[in-house]
Image: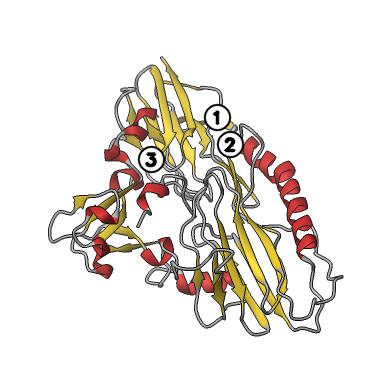
Amino acid sequence: MIVSRLFRVAVVGVVAVGTILAVAPNAGAVSQTYTVKVDGQPPTGESWSFLRFFPGPSISVHQGDVMDFAFSSTDSPHTVTLTDDADPAAWRGTNQAPGGPYELFVPDSQLGGDDESLILNPSVGAPSVPTCGTSANPCAFDSTKIVNSGIQFPNDPQPSFFVAVTAPVGSYSFLCLLHPGMEVKLTVADAATTVPTPQQVSNSAAQQLKQATKIDGSAADEMAQTVTRKNLASGPIVKINAGGFANNVTANEYPDKAVKVHVGDQVRFIGMPEIHTATFPKSSIGDPKYAFLQSFCEQVGADTPAQSPADCSDPTKFETIANPLAVGPSKNLNLGNPSAFRNSGLMVPGANGNFIAKKPGTYTFICLVHGPEMSGKLKIAA
């Protein structure tokens, strides 16, 4: 699952187009640098995220080669996390399951807190070794421990995370801790085995991104613009997709045109594999009280708000929590006042947002995770 640029302040202090052909011999002991794209740039004006690595679903290098994980997102944060498991889904099942060391959010009591807030797991958000990862000083992946970039955000210039692959010959994987399905199998080949050249890998990445843009991005975009209406025995229902999703490409947007309904209609926002909220009104995004993530200094009793670890007398007590007002649904989901706060809570497949149109008016809504680019209007007629 996960989240957008709203992580930025809070974390201070995949279908391949084709097979990469192995046609180039190993260049002896000379290390080569392979660039792997993390996400990709959508067409101008589109709020899409490619929750994939390019190329995929596998890549082969020689021991001693360097991997440049080049972040290329406009909207979504990611991690690059190298594991000793050749099956990334199995690794997730053990390590990201409830109670696992890389579970995304954990109770603060697990980290010494006393108010049972859900905290962004520092093992996910922070780099495993904060002093490496540059081109001059790559982190070393030797397969004996996890190498994690920590959460990286879209920026100008975009960040890169460099890793020297020192692991023995064998099969491994790398993945994003925030987005299921965003994963690639990594093979470390022996010196006698030919592997694709860095240029071939770059060419394949570009081809796959082009294909994902043309097919998957377009499909996700169409899904995000789809509104359906049905008359059920219980009354009319209008369904609005919470964004669109196709082959791990997500369109983080609501319909461009205002959705028209009538008093008494049920308005259902349909959850997608990427997390979203449907939150009324749109201005809720500017109210710190409703921020998706909030930061505090952990202390006995009520925690104090903070912007960074420097705000805490003990910087290790800085924590980021999932705001219950944002991630949980409102008790009242009736739309009877355009300025009243109403929230679906986090939506994923099987978890929808259900509202009832009560009074006429123009109601604006937004996703608290992805911000203004994912907003829309609902016009309720008598």
Q: Earlier in the sequence, mark 3 or mark 1?
A: 1
The residue closer to the viewer here, 365 or 4, is 4
Q: Taking 339 as reference, is 64 above or below it?
A: below
Q: Taking 289 as reference, is 9 above or below it?
A: below
Residue 203 found in image quarter: bottom right
Q: Tell me whether circle 2 and circle 1 mark residues in contact (CB < 8 Å).
A: yes
Q: Which residue is mark 2?
A: 224
Left/right placement of residue 69 relative to residue 363 reads right
Q: Residue at x 61, y 35 (%)?
A: 46
Q: Which residue appears farthest toward the front when viewing the image?
A: 136
Q: Position of residue 53 (x, y in %)?
A: 64, 58
Q: How far is disc 3 from disc 2 in space, using C-alphas?
A: 17 Å
The residue closer to the viewer here, 20 or 314, is 314
Question: Which amino acid, mark 1?
Answer: Pro
Q: Residue at x 53, y 65 (%)?
A: 133
Do we see residue 330 in this rendering? no
Q: Which residue is mark 3?
A: 344
Q: Position of residue 125 (x, y in %)?
A: 41, 60
Disc 1 is placed on an element classified as loop
Left/right placement of residue 96 relative to residue 289 reads right
Q: How far is disc 3 from disc 1 in space, using C-alphas?
A: 17 Å
Dot 3: few (<14), some (14–19), or many (≥20) neighbours within 10 Å? Answer: many
Question: Which amino acid, mark 2?
Answer: Ala
Q: Earlier in the sequence, mark 2 or mark 1?
A: 2
Q: Which residue is mark 1?
A: 255
Disc 3 is placed on an element classified as loop
Q: Taking 358 as reference, is 286 above or below it?
A: below
Q: Position of residue 267 (x, y in %)?
A: 45, 32
Question: Which amino acid, mark 3?
Answer: Ser
Disc 2 is placed on an element classified as helix
